[in-house]
Amino acid sequence: MKQTEQEFEQIVKKHKSTIYTVCYMFSKDEDEVNDLFQEVLINLWKGFEDFRGDAAVSSWIWKVALNTCISFDRKKKRQGEKIPLEMAGNLFTDEDDDSQQIRMLYQRINQLNLVDRAIVLLWLENLSYDEIAAIVGISVKNVSVKLVRIKQQLIKMSHA
Amino acid sequence: MENENTITEQQELETLRSQMDILRKKLEQETIVNEKLMRETMKSRVSTINRQGWISIAAAICMVLWFPLCFNTLSTAFIITTIVFMAVDAIATWIIHKQVDERQLMSEDMRTVTNKMKTLKKRYQWSTVIELPLVLAWCVWFCYEVIQMTGEPWQFMAGAVAFGALIGFFIALRMYRKVIDNCNAIIKQIEE
């Protein structure tokens, strides 16, 4: 395998959890997660040659994953072979305690609009306000204001 | 009372964080990415222009090369105008699509993606407004040229060209709508 391909594979495997988390939070079932995940990988590969070393890898991964999931045309038929992800479990259907906790999180976040969903995911992953602002493309102050509103919304949901 | 509310809210938010931690730990234990997936991903072609852009450019180039050979009995002015028209169309298509380099697009921040989509949409709309009357004028001129050449009754030629133009119109409209709808979907979701 060429060096570029090896580097790309290493980066993807290192950040697989981030990519999967984004795809999971923006989809409605296992099939859609698979489609989104594959689409994110393709967009990462397409941008990899131009990206190399420009900025933090994690920020780049977040941007591509979020942009892909938000702009993904769910009505369009996937071109190319559909390859299932190698997962032991199914976060949509498993009944163990951990999966139920994850589904509670999913159900709350899934009710937010797409941009708010992106912002709260970034916050939950402990990114700084500066990093969130850079990924979303808004000011730090705007991030702060939006997060206050999003948190209020999430708390209201838990009381409903 | 207010303090109690604040503490409860903090606990709620901490619950979300801990649920996120559970998700992260669960995913770390999964393989997720297999060799087949990586191979399939790396087969993707990297292009500065999307498929639609390439189809438009290819069609224009074919016309530029084919038209003078097949219709060399038409007037020189008409042939030259057609070649220039198609060449300009190919260049314009290339410029419009180059602005939204798909290699770079998804790597930008979300706001920049929206702005680029808006720009693409505006350019597409403008190019359609400019091209449509020019295409109609070209069809009329083509009818005239062919009638002059063959001596066929004008009704027959007008009908043949109108039929061809109608098919071309619907194909172009479909391509146009696809680009605009795609742009609108992205813009709408980010601007919500």
Image (spheres, rainbow, N blue to C red):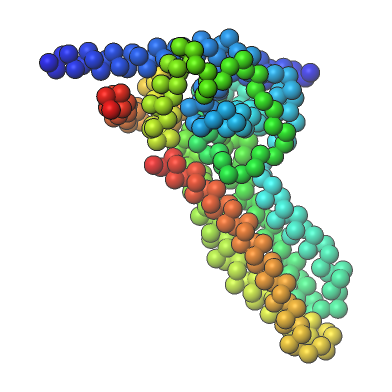
Please provide percent x and percent y for residue B170: 64, 65
Check the image and report above or below for B109 versus B92. above
Q: Observer-nearest residue: B179 or A111?
A: A111
Which image quadrant is residue A4 in?
top right
Q: Residue at x 39, y 42 (%)?
A: B192
Check the image and report above or below for A82 versus B115. above
Check the image and report above or below for B128 versus B41. below
Q: Residue at x 78, y 72 (%)?
A: B79
Which image quadrant is residue B134 in?
bottom right
Left/right placement of residue B87 relative to residue B121 reads right
Q: Examine the rendering and report whether any part of residue B159 can be seen.
A: yes
Q: How many marks?
A: 0
Left/right placement of residue B192 relative to residue B68 reads left
Quadrant location of the N terminus of chain A?
top right
Quadrant location of the C terminus of chain A?
top left
Please provide percent x and percent y for residue B73: 86, 78
Please provide percent x and percent y for residue A59: 51, 23
Q: Residue at x 56, y 42 (%)?
A: A73
Q: Of all residues shown, which one is farthest toward the left?
A: B1
